[in-house]
């Protein structure tokens, strides 16, 4: 996302404490039974017939059985006829950023609060696709060890780009000198040649990135430097040699073709400036590369919301009042660079939806990512907005939920993923909602319980 990458500036300075939105009970049990629920069958994008009880033992789903299944010694959760889904998975986030408007760069992000907001919204696994290194890897490890409460976190760390390429050009233009010197070498890896690329990948591998993020985007006016295809190929190949995949941010169809032919494993966006070309669709399909389409972030940028009522209820629940007020306040007059970006993002609104239809018609796997916590895109709640946009683009609510659970989990962990599905042997990351989100995607916001690793979290909103 072009405007709010400047929020990376304060990432390493942000707090990582127990978040305000969720807490883990002091005497938490990981053995429970969720009773009287309709179970979402994620692989088939539909509900199982009738009501069920789901038994969890030591953080793992033990059984999906009929109502009345025996569960001696288990904590009881009454689903009251609601819907039980696997925890949501967001495969495009920036956990060290902030949903504040980009001109408030001096306001530090609260990483702990961001992580809590993901959990509050039922997002139990996230992929961070651009953050300061090594700070994001320390956060990842703290979450994995249990010293930091948050969703299961996978991270790319810095973004590989051309000298002066995206997002380095935004950071240099937006940051004051006292932040610029610190942020740029931690947020980006600017490489000009294949040899530089290979060396930079080798250096990063010591921090065990879960994926490598590459940016190839000439920008709204098509004047931003881009990586050459041979350098993209060197990055992808160096990652593959260490069994680390790569994912590429692109802006148009030719950039999509270039990165796919260079060997990247996924696209972090569909083209945001235009409708995807038939040639790009063919190249992506031939390479079996999935696409994280990220409709919402471009809509939020191109058509800013002007009333609190324009935000989803769950967005308002996680939004601090001062952040919401800042987003609704009149924006400063944009410079030429920003004005061009906003104009192109708005003009391509319908083109991006046609692109989703073309991707799906070609059998290309569509994935769900929010690009939160960028400006106006709240952590956790932003994935709810993205799913609503996917439904608007032609997916059924059940299909959108399948993407945000089963498909995203398989992308992160392969066919043997132990999350993303309500089934025996899977990790007990679960969400109970009132209503039926397979019929009405808006019902997904009616969360009554979030279960992380078999523990029922305590949730409390901070906004209205």
Image (cartoon, helix red, strand yellow):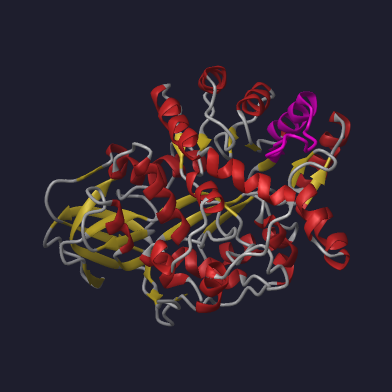
The magenta span reads: 214-240
Residue depicted at 64% across the width and 70% down the height:
109
Q: Is residue 77 left or right of residue 175?
A: left
Q: Is residue 236 above or below residue 405?
A: above
Q: Is residue 351 left or right of residue 390?
A: right
| Residue 289 locus on image (x, y percent) | 54, 28
| Whether residue 48 can be seen here | yes
Q: Is residue 40 left or right of residue 429?
A: left
Q: Is residue 77 left or right of residue 276?
A: left
Residue depicted at 38% across the width and 66% down the height:
309
Q: Nearer the viewer, residue 454 or 160?
A: 160
| Residue 429 locus on image (x, y percent) | 39, 58
| Whether residue 453 can be seen here | no
Q: Nearer the viewer, residue 199 or 374?
A: 374
Whether residue 257 is in magenta: the answer is no
- Looking at the rendering, which quadrant does residue 42 occupy? top left
Whether residue 220 is in magenta: the answer is yes
Q: Residue furthest bottom?
A: 26
Residue depicted at 48% across the width and 60% down the height:
305
| Residue 350 locus on image (x, y percent) | 45, 36
The number of numbered badges drawn on the structure is 0
Q: Is residue 126 above or below residue 269?
A: below
Q: Nearer the viewer, residue 23 or 447?
A: 447
């Amino acid at each position: 996302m072009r405007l709010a990458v400047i929020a990376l500036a304060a990432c390493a300075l942000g707090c990582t404490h127990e978040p305000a939105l969720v807490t883990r009970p002091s005497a938490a049990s990981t053995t429970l039974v969720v009773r009287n629920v309709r179970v979402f069958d994620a692989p088939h994008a539909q509900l199982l017939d009738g009501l069920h009880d789901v038994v969890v033992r030591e953080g793992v789903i033990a059984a999906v059985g009929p109502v009345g299944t025996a569960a001696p010694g288990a904590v009881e959760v009454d689903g009251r006829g609601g819907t039980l889904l696997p925890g949501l998975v967001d495969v495009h986030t920036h956990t060290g950023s902030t949903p504040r408007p980009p001109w408030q760069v001096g306001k530090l992000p609260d990483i702990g609060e961001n992580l809590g907001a993901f959990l509050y919204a039922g997002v139990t696994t996230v992929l961070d696709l651009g953050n300061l290194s090594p700070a994001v890897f320390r956060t990842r490890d703290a979450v994995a060890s249990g010293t930091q409460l948050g969703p299961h976190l996978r991270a790319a760390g810095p973004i590989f780009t051309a000298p002066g390429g995206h997002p380095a050009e935004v950071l240099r233009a937006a940051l004051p000198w006292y932040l610029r010197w610190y942020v740029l070498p931690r947020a980006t890896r600017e490489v000009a040649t294949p040899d530089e690329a290979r060396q930079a990948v080798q250096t990063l591998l010591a921090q065990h990135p879960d994926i490598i993020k590459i940016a190839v985007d000439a920008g709204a006016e098509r004047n931003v430097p881009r990586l050459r295809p041979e350098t993209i190929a060197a990055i992808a190949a160096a990652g593959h040699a260490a069994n680390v995949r790569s994912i590429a941010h692109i802006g148009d169809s030719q950039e999509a073709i270039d990165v796919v032919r260079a060997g990247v494993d996924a696209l972090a966006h569909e083209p945001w400036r235009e409708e995807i070309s038939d040639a790009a669709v063919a190249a992506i399909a031939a390479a079996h590369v999935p696409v994280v389409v990220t409709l919402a972030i471009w809509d939020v940028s191109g058509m800013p919301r002007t009333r609190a009522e324009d935000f989803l209820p769950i967005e308002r629940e996680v939004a601090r009042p001062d952040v919401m007020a800042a987003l609704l306040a009149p924006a400063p007059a944009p410079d030429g660079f920003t004005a061009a970006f906003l104009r192109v993002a708005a003009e391509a609104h319908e083109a991006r939806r046609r692109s989703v239809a073309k991707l799906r018609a070609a059998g290309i796997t569509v994935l769900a990512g929010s690009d939160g916590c960028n400006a106006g895109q709240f952590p956790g709640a932003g994935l709810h907005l993205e799913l609503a946009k996917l439904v608007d683009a032609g997916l059924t609510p059940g299909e959108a939920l399948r993407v945000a659970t089963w498909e995203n989990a398989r992308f992160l962990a392969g066919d043997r993923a132990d999350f993303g599905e309500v089934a025996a042997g899977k990790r007990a990351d679960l969400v109970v909602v009132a209503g039926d989100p397979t019929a009405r995607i808006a019902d997904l916001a009616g969360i009554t319980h979030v279960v992380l690793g078999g523990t029922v979290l305590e949730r409390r909103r901070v906004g209205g």
